[in-house]
Image (cartoon, rainbow, N blue to C red):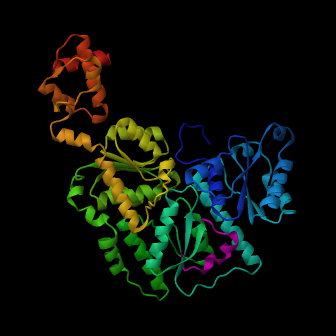
Amino acid sequence: MKLAYWMYAGPAHIGTLRIASSFKNVHAIMHAPLGDDYFNVMRSMLERDRDFTPVTASIVDRHVLARGSQEKVINNIARKDKEEKPDLIVLTPTCTSSILQEDLSNFVKRASFESQADIILADVNHYRVNELEASDRTLEQIISFYLNKAKNDNSLKTHKTLKPSVNIIGVTSLGFHHHHDLVELKRLFEDLNIDVNQVLPDNTLVDNLKTLPQAWFNCVPYREIGLMSAKLLKKEFNMPFIDIAPIGLMNIETFAKEIQKILTKNNIFQDYTAYLDTQSKYISQSAWFSRSIDCQNLIGKTAVVFGDTTHAAAITKILHEEMGIHVIWSGTYCIHDSVWFKQEIEKYCDQVIITDDHELIGNLIAKTEPNAIFGTQMERHIGKRLNIPCGVISSPVHIQNFPLSYKPFIGYEGTNQIADLIYNSFTMGMEDHLLELFGGHDKIKNAVEPSSLENKNELFWSFEAQQELSRIPRFIRGKVKKNTEKFALDNNYSEINLNVMYEAKEKISG
């Protein structure tokens, strides 16, 4: 737990609430102070969802501090059980409730005596884990609870489906393009002749969890949420799982080959080579586009990547292998998954960065001066400040990255979206590129700097001074020019040469 200006992953209770609100007819009650109950607003604003189960906040106020929370929490559980008739109520502790050291597990036991719904206490250490880790753990806990319940009442379904089938695990509310990705993922499985058994937790009833063992294998498209559940099902029912995100042509091919291996072990022999070839040539436009004359402009360009492990790793591979772009460094804020991330991308970039410190990332971007950034909303802010274009490829994000239009990252349509994102990110500011191509800002007759307009005095820059100015990084070039011109005008210089530039630099720096 820490006080921070910015966090890449939110507090643990947000992760638990994301899982609970993703299921159908599951209600979450959060034991927290007033001010922590912003999840409903965030969910409805970002996803613009008109139909979801809102979270109930059991507010910790002065009365609770004086008398304790037991009566209030139990009454809230009983009230919601009666009003909403949910299948499951998840009681979500927060750092505040942990500080008060209240026995919430005992509250759950007492409330269970009179409640028709199942009630569980989210088993998450709110001091030690973040939003993503809590999401992963809460999903595993709910799955484990209902599998054990099905075992005890002999309703567990373990016989495999006649046709190869899959469980998709980890599609949640507030996920980065998750619902668009799900459409593409279903389409991909349909093309590969694989049925979808269950999608978790997206709009799924907890009663359907007893059918999970019927699938032939599990798919975890995002490592951040679902990996623990897949490992649980592997341990309990020997179900294989694929944790490769089919983002980019390379990953899609690897993904399909892993499915082939699973089917072969079950005596079903499929060869997806022809399908992959056809899709790459005629459906995905990114393969030929990356070799087109337009993309030749990207040769020699540099980029940096930062985000969650799934998207940062996938985009790094695409930039290096599919687009031929030099990745200076690639990083993730998912410190708990750093070993996998390093192994996955170390050969595709010069340096691997593992940190959740946004200031360190900002300094690295300023130091390395890439041509483009691919990161989260924070890197977008950093890029805007440094005048470096940024393509957003990972949470956390603002509302513009919860688009109403169809923009998946997964599958063959996803490859088109990513190719557009990469190309447009590099070509943002093309006006600057064209001006430099035809002589630069300072040689265009009508290109006048704001400083010149303000002072209404013309200053002549010598050829040597113009060359020196062009060597200065673009994101601070305008400021240097403005300061130099101001110094020249203040000291009655009519021409700016190298000596004036150096004199201005010494004066301003001193």
Q: How many marks?
A: 0
Q: Residue at x 59, y 84 (%)?
A: 160
Q: Which quadrant is the N terminus positioned in?
A: top right
Q: Residue at x 85, y 52 (%)?
A: 75
Name the outermost residue toward the left.
Answer: 463
Q: Residue at x 27, y 22 (%)?
A: 453
Q: Residue at x 50, y 47 (%)?
A: 398
Relative vertical location of residue 159 with respect to residue 394 in this rendering, above or below: below
Magenta segment boundaries in residue numbering: 202-217
Residue 146 percent across, percent down from the top left? 71, 70
Look at the image and say whether residue 211 sits in the magenta stretch: yes
Depth order, front residue of 261/20: 20
Depth order, front residue of 227/91: 91
Depth order, front residue of 167/340: 167
Instruction: Specify whether 220 is left or right of 39.
Output: left
Q: Is residue 9 visible?
A: yes
Instruction: Specify whether 125 is left or right of 119.
Output: left
Instruction: Specify whether 474 is left or right of 145.
Output: left
Q: In which image quadrant can residue 106 be found?
A: bottom right
Q: In which image quadrant can residue 231 be found?
A: bottom right
Q: Is residue 347 visible?
A: no
Residue 437 percent across, percent down from the top left? 17, 41
Residue 93 percent across, percent down from the top left? 72, 50
Look at the image and say whether residue 391 sits in the magenta stretch: no
Q: Which quadrant is the C terminus positioned in?
A: top left
Relative vertical location of residue 340 with respect to residue 94 in this rendering, above or below: below
Relative vertical location of residue 12 with respect to residue 159 in this rendering, above or below: above
Relative vertical location of residue 3 with respect to residue 501 in this rendering, above or below: below
